[in-house]
């Protein structure tokens, strides 16, 4: 067995296959390029999925990769296992070779065998293979190609030896190469057998998949155009074997991270001791670093949520090592050091990753501390009430309000001899989901859906992409929740038309407004909403009577609609420019497109620098000034995804979608209204940029007429300032500079004058001192703005007096203040300032304030 570093093992793999005619292809991003079926790339074959399916051609038919993978979300989740087994990870690297219709089983086996036994020098006598139950071909091929004795070839069922990327997609029987690490590692259970036991004796190192089918959603398997090969070997596992390490964590891929965690925590990583927190932290720091470097930031949904769970889990285990402050971010440079040569993006993105992780840690620790206090109270109260359980609703409140993980609540409760009512917790969680769903449906106008009058109406045809006015028939009128035959002048209600040019609020774009006219009347359209495909216009009748059956001329407010369209197209350009300037992690988190301005919320961890803001504006405006056509295409959702169109996470799209794009920018799925060419936007200007939550920024911007109004307003304000300063608007800067200088000089003069005045007052007071016994005493009424001013004056008089006592009185509008002071020698002689002030105050009818 050759002793090799992980980096050598990786490069030996790639160069071995390069020599066998394979093209070495870089790892793809962890974020699948155009595959909505998975959150993260889970295997080397993901970037080649369409090549296997015959949908995409590459300039090569053989490839080898070292692919970044994450299995931490959904059904591929290894998250809860990580740290407790020797070989599970959230993030790992998969070494793989691929044949797209060229070689098949025999070569795949021969190459794997040669690399393992000769390239890596593994003893052939320790290697076994598992094959798919019915795969006789694989059975004899292993004997023929590798000389593997039949007793070390084991047939297993589909669970172990049929590989599929997911419910749908390319799949086929597979064969795994397993190394027997020796009896001493066996669990010695009766059931301990190769391929069926999870113990450390049998380690699966390489999976060879013979890709033969494409499985469709209904489970039908159609043969692929050409049988292909997809193999995967976990770098961490093969490294642990070649380095003779007890677990993946005891290799050079992880040990430097352990070293740093030791340094931070002051605890030792000593396998096989209680090492789980170390392993969890080491694994999760790699996952966090790689995921963020690929542009994902912590959030509450999708990939961002998986990332958040990973980071928070690591923090919880940090606490077990006694680390209470943020620390994960300090592991990022260590990860970048270990992996940066193979994955240069880690070095490029290091700063971003450090900042993002640190921000997430701070945020979590803050809520955790608050949660911890509340949790302690709840636990103490439950105990005092003699309960054996922290009730589910309380645990849910902790989770919901303080982001306090239920596992942590469980640990805390256990420390006090209590359990957590998990069923109650799950029930509270389910109820919350239900409420959220109901709220969302209500927001979407769903409340109207059940109304019988609405169900009786046809779905409204929206023609606003083509025309802004047309004749249409009134199909229904509703006021309150009742259907009405007519609305009289002055009345307001909801109206449904046979067709409409009015856009109903959706996708952040506000509704159109406008008016309806008919021979005997007119109504204003104030707002429009969707309900089950019907457009409900909120109308206010201005004159005449609006009746069901009437044909009205429905007219959208054109200039307002044009302003909205300008802002909507500009919103897309802004999204695109932000991604270019700030990085791929920028994602839309919400938007509001109105006639006067646009608002765009996006994921990013810090405020924009002035330079970044200017670059975003310049990129958008360059696009506007090039006057590029805006293309709107309707296509199948798969095609849109294949073209890389941006879809909003969590948004539900139908089978056909509208894709809006303009030269060079990434197209977006969008149902909104847009300008025909970018020049119509006029100009784009950011008027504000702010934070709207953790990792969320907001840009407000104006275009076209909105920008014109903004400029007029700014100009107007400038003129007002100029008038107030008695200057022309062009002389403002010299005028203001001059005024500031004058003000500073006057302040200085004032200070000098005040000092002089104070000195004169002080010497006047000291000169007027009387001697009582052998003590000099100053008693006077003075001017002082407040208690502090009086005290300062007192200090000066006492200093000038050298030895003696003083009593000063001052009046302000509503009160009298006395101050008594004495030098230390006078105090020694028996003067008690407290008594003096009390006496003086009594004369003035008040009390002594100390
Ligand atoms: N796709 C297979 C796996 O993930 C082989 O790479 O195991």
Image (cartoon, rainbow, N blue to C red):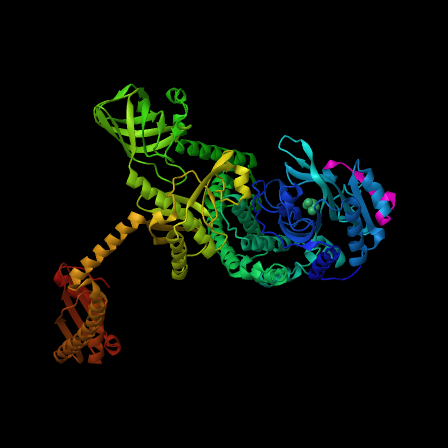
Is residue 51 among what the camera can see?
yes
Quadrant position of residue 340: bottom right
Position of 845 compared to 78: left or right? left
Q: Give the range drawn in magenta.
A: 145-158
From this view, report whether residue 776 is shown above or below residue 635. below
Position of 667 compared to 259: left or right? left
- Residue 301 spot, x, y in % from top left: 50, 43
Is residue 695 among what the camera can see?
no
Position of 452 compared to 354: left or right? left
- Residue 756 spot, x, y in % from top left: 16, 78
Quadrant position of residue 131: top right
Quadrant housing the C terminus: bottom left
Name the residue nearer the viewer: 67 or 329. 67
Quadrant housing the N terminus: bottom right
Position of 773 compared to 189: left or right? left
Residue for point 45% across, 57% down: 581
Q: Let me know if residue 150 is in the magenta part.
A: yes
Ligand 1 shown in quarter: top right
Name the residue nearer the viewer: 400 or 687. 687
Q: Let me know if residue 720 is in the magenta part.
A: no
The number of discs equals 0
- Residue 844 spot, x, y in % from top left: 12, 62
- Residue 840 spot, x, y in % from top left: 15, 65
């Amino acid at each position: 067995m050759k002793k090799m570093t992980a980096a050598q093992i990786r490069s030996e793999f790639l160069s071995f296959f390069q020599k066998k005619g394979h093209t070495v292809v870089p790892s793809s991003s962890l974020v699948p390029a155009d595959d909505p079926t998975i959150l993260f790339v889970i295997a080397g074959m993901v970037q080649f999925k369409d090549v296997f399916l015959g949908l995409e051609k590459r300039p090569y038919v053989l490839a080898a990769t070292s692919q970044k993978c994450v299995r931490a979300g959904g059904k591929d989740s290894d998250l809860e296992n990580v740290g407790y087994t020797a070989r599970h990870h959230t993030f790992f690297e998969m070494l793989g070779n691929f044949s797209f219709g060229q070689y098949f089983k025999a070569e795949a086996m021969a190459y794997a065998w040669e690399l393992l036994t000769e390239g890596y020098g593994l003893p052939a006598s320790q290697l076994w293979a598992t094959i798919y139950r019915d795969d006789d071909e694989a059975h004899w091929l292993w004997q023929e190609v590798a000389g593997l004795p039949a007793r070390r070839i084991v047939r297993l069922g589909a669970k172990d030896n049929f590989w599929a990327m997911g419910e749908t997609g390319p799949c086929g029987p597979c064969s795994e190469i397993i190394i027997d690490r020796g009896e001493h590692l066996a669990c010695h259970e009766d059931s301990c057998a190769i391929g069926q036991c999870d113990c450390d004796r049998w380690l699966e190192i390489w999976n060879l998949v013979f890709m033969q089918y494409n499985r469709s959603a209904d489970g039908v398997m159609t043969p692929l155009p050409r049988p292909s090969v997809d193999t995967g070997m976990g770098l961490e596992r093969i490294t642990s074997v070649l380095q003779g390490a007890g677990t993946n964590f005891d290799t050079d891929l992880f040990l430097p991270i352990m070293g740093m965690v030791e340094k931070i925590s002051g605890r030792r990583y000593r396998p096989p001791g209680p090492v789980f927190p170390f392993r969890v932290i080491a694994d999760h720091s790699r996952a966090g670093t790689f995921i963020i470097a690929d542009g994902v930031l912590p959030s509450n949904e999708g990939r961002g949520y998986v990332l958040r769970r990973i980071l928070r889990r690591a923090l919880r285990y940090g606490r077990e090592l006694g680390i209470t402050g943020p620390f994960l971010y300090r592991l990022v440079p260590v990860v970048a050091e270990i992996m940066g040569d193979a994955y240069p993006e880690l070095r490029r993105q290091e700063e971003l990753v450090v900042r993002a992780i640190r921000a997430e840690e701070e945020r979590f620790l803050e809520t955790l501390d608050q949660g911890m206090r509340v949790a302690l109270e709840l636990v103490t109260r439950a105990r005092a009430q003699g309960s054996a359980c922290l009730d589910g609703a309380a645990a849910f409140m902790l989770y919901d309000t303080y982001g306090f993980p239920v596992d942590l609540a469980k640990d805390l409760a256990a420390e006090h001899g209590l359990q957590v009512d998990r069923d109650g917790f799950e029930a509270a969680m389910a109820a919350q989901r239900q409420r959220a769903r109901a709220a969302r449906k209500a927001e979407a106008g769903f409340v109207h859906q059940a109304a019988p009058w609405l169900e009786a109406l046809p779905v409204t045809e929206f023609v606003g992409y083509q025309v802004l006015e047309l004749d249409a028939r009134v199909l229904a009128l509703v006021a309150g929740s009742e259907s009405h035959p007519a609305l009289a002048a002055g009345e307001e209600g909801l109206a449904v038309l046979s067709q409409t040019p009015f856009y109903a609020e959706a996708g952040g774009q506000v509704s159109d407004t406008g008016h309806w006219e008919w021979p005997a009347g007119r109504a204003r359209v104030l707002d429009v909403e969707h309900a089950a495909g019907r457009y409900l216009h909120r109308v206010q009748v201005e004159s005449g009577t609006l009746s069901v059956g009437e044909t009205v001329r429905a007219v959208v407010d054109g200039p307002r609609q044009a302003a909205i369209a300008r802002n909507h197209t500009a919103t897309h350009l802004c999204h695109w420019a932000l991604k270019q300037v700030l990085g791929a992690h920028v994602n839309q988190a919400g938007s509001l497109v109105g006639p006067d301005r646009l608002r765009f919320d996006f994921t990013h961890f810090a405020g924009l620098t002035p330079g970044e803001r200017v670059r975003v504006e310049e990129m958008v405006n360059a696009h506007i000034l090039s006057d590029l056509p805006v293309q709107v295409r309707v296509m199948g959702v798969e095609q849109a995804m294949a073209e890389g169109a941006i879809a909003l996470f969590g948004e539900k799209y139908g089978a056909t979608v509208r894709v809006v794009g303009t030269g060079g920018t990434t197209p977006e799925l969008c149902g909104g209204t847009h300008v025909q060419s970018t020049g119509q936007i006029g100009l784009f200007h950011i008027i504000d940029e702010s934070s709207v939550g953790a990792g969320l920024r907001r840009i407000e911007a104006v275009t076209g007429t909105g920008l014109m109004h903004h400029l007029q307003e700014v100009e107007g304000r400038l003129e007002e300032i100029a008038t107030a300063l008695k200057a022309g608007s062009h002389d403002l800067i010299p005028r203001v500079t001059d005024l500031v200088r004058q003000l500073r000089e006057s302040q200085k003069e004032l200070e000098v004058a005040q000092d002089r005045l104070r000195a004169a007052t002080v010497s006047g007071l000291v000169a007027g001192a009387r001697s009582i016994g052998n003590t000099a005493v100053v008693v006077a009424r003075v001017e002082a703005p407040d208690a502090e001013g009086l005290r300062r004056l007192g200090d000066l008089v006492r200093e000038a007096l050298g030895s003696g006592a003083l009593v000063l009185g001052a009046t302000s509008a509503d009160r009298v203040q006395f101050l008594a002071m004495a030098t230390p020698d006078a105090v020694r002689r028996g003067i008690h300032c407290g008594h003096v002030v009390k006496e003086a105050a009594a004369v003035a009818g008040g009390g002594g304030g100390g």
